[in-house]
Amino acid sequence: MRIPLRSLSFSVLVAVAASGAAPAAAQPAAPYTLLIKGGHVIDVKNGRDGVMDVAIADGKVAEVAASIDAAKATRVVDAAGLYVVPGLIDMHAHVFHGTEPDAYLSNGLVAVVPDSHSFRNGQTTLVDAGGAGWRNFLQFKTNVIDVSKTRVLSFLNIVGSGMKGGPAEQDPNDMDARLTSMRIRQYPGVIVGIKVAHYNGGDWIPVDRAVEAGTDAEVPVMVDFGGHFPPLSLDALLNTHLRPGDILTHMYGHVRGRYPIVNEQGQVEPYVIAARKRGVIFDVGHGGGSFLWRQAVPATKQGFFPDVISTDLHGGSENAGMKDILNVMSKTMSLGMPLKDVIAANTVKAASVIKRDDLGHLGVGTEADVAVLALRKGDFGFVDSSGGRMKGTQKLECEVTIRAGQVVWDLNGRAAPDWSTMPVVPQSSSALPPRRSTPQK
């Protein structure tokens, strides 16, 4: 017979509670939302190079230790046999389509949607290199920076209208140091430098005005010397016009058919060595036409490796020899650059160059941007901008990317639960919810 609860005496209720019939108290929530366990951590800034666990909570790195109890995390990524590194930074990309139709096409560039490319390659930060100038930066910010999960930063073009193509990039009247500096100061940390490119004039106007603005705003200048400064000397650029901390991109490319780093005798030019000693930064900037084995091989044999490894990402380069940042990093390893140095070039070193010291490392309290990488062994081939192939025996591949504590790329489901442990979801005859007969309140 069922006895109504209200008829039980207080003493009986106390006895029932004491007997354990009452529901157990809820268990406290795990302190970590995500735990990356058993991976080889390479975090150059913090001196970490070994097997460790990385715990994440509230979107930030919460703990890095030799062993962290998996029970403390609601989600665990098994990273055994993999490398765990800070989210990669690509210091030279093109992700702004411009303000007019086909503006980039006139330069042979097609901008890439950041989130469609970055996360699958372990990148959490892309720096657009000169797509926008002071005139159209706000459109770039609204249309790309503010709506991307990828952290998008900018090198502001010294040309006010940006990388517009054609005559617009040749007008010194639109190269305004004061207005460029003002825009940078308006968005510190988002605009991290100034870009000079595509100038056909035989003078230093764009470089000198960019340096003037960079000095005022305290940011570096990146120069694409390319083939666009016909009568000018690369020696003068590197050792007279640029400051320590300024950047030469496309370091393994060519200038009007000549190789800028290595001379005809196969030796690294003395003025290049002098520029590095005085603090000029050398960046790969691979692109569709700016990486040649005939330049890179002799340079690296003499120990002249890049300071920063970037892609010059655009629609043409990602479908050619460049492909993606991991391919370019793997190429550099095939030239003899150690893995630890390659990781540093795309994390702490790149962050230092753009003066974003909050990026490029896994310090406790920093935003949890993490890449989990596999180093594949085998028979690989890497193609340069001329179509020449070099063999390699190792290649990086991204397994998991975490942006601000959230898993945004998971190649093999390492962060996902086994399907058999998941609750059954009732199937519907339609992917759409059933129609309501009365309006929803």
Image (cartoon, rainbow, N blue to C red):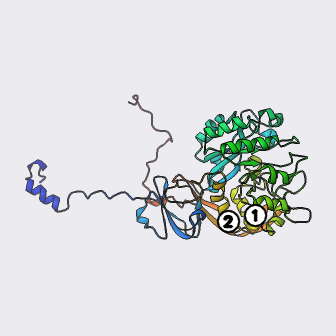
Q: Tell me if 275 is positioned left or right of 112 in this view.
A: right
Q: Quadrant of the N terminus?
A: bottom left
Residue 341 vs residue 56, the one in the foreground: 341
In percent of width and height, residue 11 lies at: 8, 56
Q: Amino acid at mark 2?
A: Asp
Q: Picture quarter containing residue 306?
A: bottom right
- Identified at 61% across, 36% down, the residue is 142
Residue 16 vs residue 106, the one in the foreground: 106
In percent of width and height, residue 287 lies at: 77, 52
Residue 388 seen anywhere in this rendered image of the structure: no
Residue 438 seen anywhere in this rendered image of the structure: yes
User: Which numbered dot is residue 341?
Assistant: 2
Q: Amino acid at mark 1?
A: Phe
- Identified at 77% across, 33% down, the residue is 174
Residue 175 vs residue 70, the one in the foreground: 175
Q: Tell me if 123 is positioned left or right of 438 in this view.
A: right
Query: Is 37 situated above or below 139?
Result: below
User: Which numbered dot is residue 93?
Assistant: none
Q: Tell me if 377 is positioned left or right of 258 in this view.
A: left
Give the farthest residue toward the top. Answer: 439
Q: Which residue is mark 1?
A: 305
Q: Quadrant of the C terminus?
A: top left
